[in-house]
Amino acid sequence: MAEADPKPIVAAEPPYPPAGVGWSTVAVLLIAYVFSFADRQILSLLVGPIKADLRINDTQFSLLSGFAFAIFYTVLGLPFGRLADRYSRRRIIAIGAALWSAATVACGFARSYAALFAARVGVGVGEASLGPAAFSMMSDLFPPERRARAFSVYSLGIYIGAGLALVFGGLIVGAVSSTPTIELPFVGEVASWHAAFILIGAPGLLLPVFLYLVPEPARRGRATVATTRGPGLRETLSHVWGHRALFGPFLLGFALMVLAGFATLAWAPEMFIRTYGSNPAEAGTSIGLTMVAAGSAGVLAGGWFADRLLARGRRDAVLIGGVVSALAGVIPAIAFPLMPTAGAALALLALVFFFGAFVSGAAPSALPAVVPNEMRGQVSAIYLLAINLIGIGFGPLLPALLTDFAFGDPAALRYALAIVGGAAGLIAAALLQRARAPYRAAVSV
């Protein structure tokens, strides 16, 4: 007689940890995210010296900030997601943090385009460990009605890290603008742009120490079968495909919002330099501080907005926030690069950062409600693959292609940014609106 298929066994749910434990863990994850974004964002302020030193054009440079990082960052997110569903998530992040920090330092020793490209690939490989493991940990630290706020606080790392990288990088470039080289302890004489990578990457090598100070949270909502090791990638992809009416517009809509954001992050400093005659220190400091203030406010406001709607029974609260965010950001995204003065452009750029951040933190918090626990790491990796391959890969590339080949004029970068930001926002709003009904249906099942 054939043996019956094993039945899923749902383990008794342990209580959620005290709020202090949850928020202290989020704080450490936030620090890791700050370092990861600082390591990837420093490149955007070094366009001029890197192009001159390596003799490359805008499109080649965009590949360093886009696809060199994004391809491995996104593809390796899938195996890291699988590991996050099975093994210690804090250990995965600690190993990844050591790798991406070392790779950032290696960028400071690159003497050719190929070497810098390879080092940027290493940054992407290391940072691929963070998202799936962090999302999975936070899902087990907070009940559903508090997750959006926790995810939003974690996502402050985008704006704090990127903003501080611009400020720090601007000060470095400004400090050494009178000389092409700088002397560093234990390293010797290096080019100024090499020094920026070394100085911003080296402190991240201490991150594993902090990560081992936080506990590994117990997993919740987990169905287990004694004869299996949990669902693999095939089962996870089957779950996503079975809900394609939800995941299709959900993933593409948020990916286009990320695309618009990374186009701005990659090229706004250089646009200020080319259009308004700002120097790197001025551009880095003004844009960086604006990003920290406006982006952080947007992230926190978006998390509060989503939690308030969820408390009122609006199960699609995060998607409502996405539609609001995308539509509200369209006009500032089109207008800021077309302003006649740097001050006016910076004021509108603050709105771009605010509305771009409004839903960026809360977006992944919508996934646990429609994904079994045993798949959360892998589905988080699929989410990150989609939004980052499209967002990070094409965000820096599209303005560069328009500037180099459509306009044929480096000074036209401002028009390329306006086109990409406006179009991406409008299409994203339509897609996220379409995802609302299937999301509500999936939550109610």
Image (spheres, grey):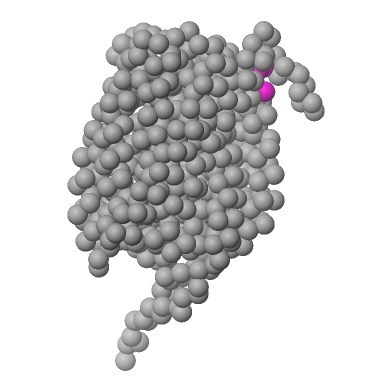
Residue at 21%, 40% in the rendered image = 430
Number of numbered discs visible in the structure rendering: 0
Region in magenta: 191-195
Q: In this orientation, which residue lies closer to the viewer: 197 or 27?
A: 27
Location of residue 270 in the rendering, given as x and y in whole percent from the top left corner: 47, 17
Q: Quadrant of the C terminus?
A: bottom left
In the figure, residue 366 lies in which quadrant?
bottom left
Location of residue 101 in the rendering, given as x and y in whole percent from the top left corner: 63, 38
Location of residue 57 in the rendering, given as x and y in whole percent from the top left corner: 45, 14
Residue at 28%, 34% in the rendered image = 328
Visible in this render: residue 328?
A: yes
* Residue 274 in the figure: left or right of residue 428: right
Visible in this render: residue 84?
A: no
| Vertical placement of residue 141 versus 298, above or below | below
Q: Quadrant of the N terminus?
A: bottom left
| Vertical placement of residue 84 versus 301, above or below | below
- Taken as a whole, is the magenta stretch helix, strand or loop? helix
* Residue 69 in the figure: left or right of residue 250: right
Q: In this orientation, which residue lies closer to the viewer: 398 or 157?
A: 157
